[in-house]
Image (cartoon, rainbow, N blue to C red):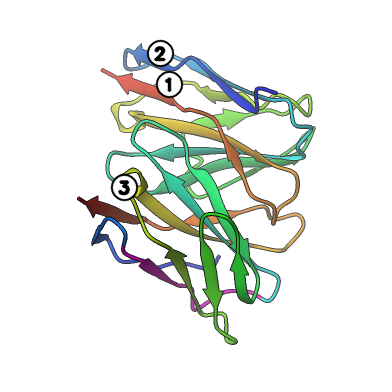
């Protein structure tokens, strides 16, 4: 299983861009990289998913270098409501495995 | 469309008691997962299922059992509750192994 490593915490201010990096040195060829957001007392919520290069949706961008050993979640112009824990998940592409490994997450605190 | 529904939301058990945490999804997803999340920590996979009748162990399966008789339901059974099983339990589902997971709101379980 690909183990992930993220910073424990990050601070930012409203309106700034925030970049959270996840290391996954043992990523397998078929693995995708998925990021989730979790608020207190709620289940994680999907943000973005990618396999290589860059992916962008209405809330975030995901940058994945060619070697795929890391990935960076980019949140443009954060607001107070973006204060949450962010998890990087590297899932196996093996059809019958279905095993997924969450890291300990990055607690992002956005200040006014 | 309710997504993933977990019951109960809260429960207090005595040591040695047993109980079943219920999880049902209405998205016709093949994959279902059970995670536990201890305070301030990430999610750890307990069991997962790739379809009706097929289940497999995750990272921390000891003390738990699961079954998957239908596509919709994936109950988690605690046979002899122990204080170490005090945690928040999340159920999730996905269409395929590399597709984003949809989470329920969790069951907060305390064992005294």
Pointer 1 and pointer 3 on the same chain: no
* Label 3: element kind: loop
Residue at x-position 46% and y-position 66%: A73
The span from disc 1 to disc 3 (Cα, nearest Å) is: 38 Å
Circles 2 and 1, Cβ within 8 Å, touching? The answer is yes
Q: Which residues are the magenta region?
A: A16-28
Callout 2: chain? B
The span from disc 3 to disc 2 (Cα, nearest Å) is: 38 Å
For disc 2, the neighbor class at 10 Å (few under 14, some 14 to 19, many from 20) is few
Q: Position of residue B49 (x, y in %)?
A: 69, 40
Residue at x-position 36% and y-position 30%: A41
Residue at x-position 20% and y-position 50%: A112
Q: Which residue is mark 2?
A: B17
For disc 1, the neighbor class at 10 Å (few under 14, some 14 to 19, many from 20) is some
Residue at x-position 75% and y-position 37%: B29
Up/down of A18 relative to B22, above or below? below
Up/down of B108 relative to A11, above or below? above
Q: Position of residue B45 (x, y in %)?
A: 51, 45
* Label 2: element kind: loop
Is B101 or A72 nearer to us in this picture?
Answer: A72
Pointer 2 and pointer 1 on the same chain: yes
Q: Which residue is mark 3?
A: A83
Q: Which residue is mark 1?
A: B80
For disc 3, the neighbor class at 10 Å (few under 14, some 14 to 19, many from 20) is many
Q: Position of residue B87 (x, y in %)?
A: 35, 31
Instruction: Decide whether residue A23 is among the magenta residues.
Output: yes
Callout 1: chain? B
How many numbered marks have been drawn onto this rendered protein structure?
3
């Amino acid at each position: 299983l690909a183990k992930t490593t993220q910073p424990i915490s990050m601070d930012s201010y409203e309106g700034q861009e925030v970049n959270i990096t996840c290391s996954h040195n043992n990523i397998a060829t078929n693995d995708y990289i998925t990021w989730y957001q979790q608020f207190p007392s709620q289940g994680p919520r999907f943000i973005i998913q990618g396999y290589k290069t860059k992916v962008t949706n209405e809330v975030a961008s995901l940058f994945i270098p060619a070697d795929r050993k890391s990935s960076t979640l980019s949140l443009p112009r954060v607001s107070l409501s973006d204060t949450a824990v962010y998890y990087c998940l590297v899932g196996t592409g093996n059809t019958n495995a279905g095993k997924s490994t969450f890291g300990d997450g990055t607690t992002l605190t956005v200040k006014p | 469309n309710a997504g993933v529904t977990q019951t109960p939301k809260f429960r207090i058990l005595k040591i040695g008691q047993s109980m079943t945490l219920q999880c049902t999804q209405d998205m016709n997803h093949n994959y279902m997962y059970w995670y536990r999340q201890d305070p301030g920590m990430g999610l750890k996979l307990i069991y997962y299922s790739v379809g009706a009748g097929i289940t497999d162990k995750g990272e921390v399966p000891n003390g738990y059992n699961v079954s998957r008789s239908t596509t919709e339901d994936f109950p988690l059974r605690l046979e002899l509750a122990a204080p170490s099983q005090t945690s928040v339990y999340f159920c999730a589902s996905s269409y395929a192994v590399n597709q984003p997971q949809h989470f329920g709101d969790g069951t907060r379980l305390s064992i005294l």
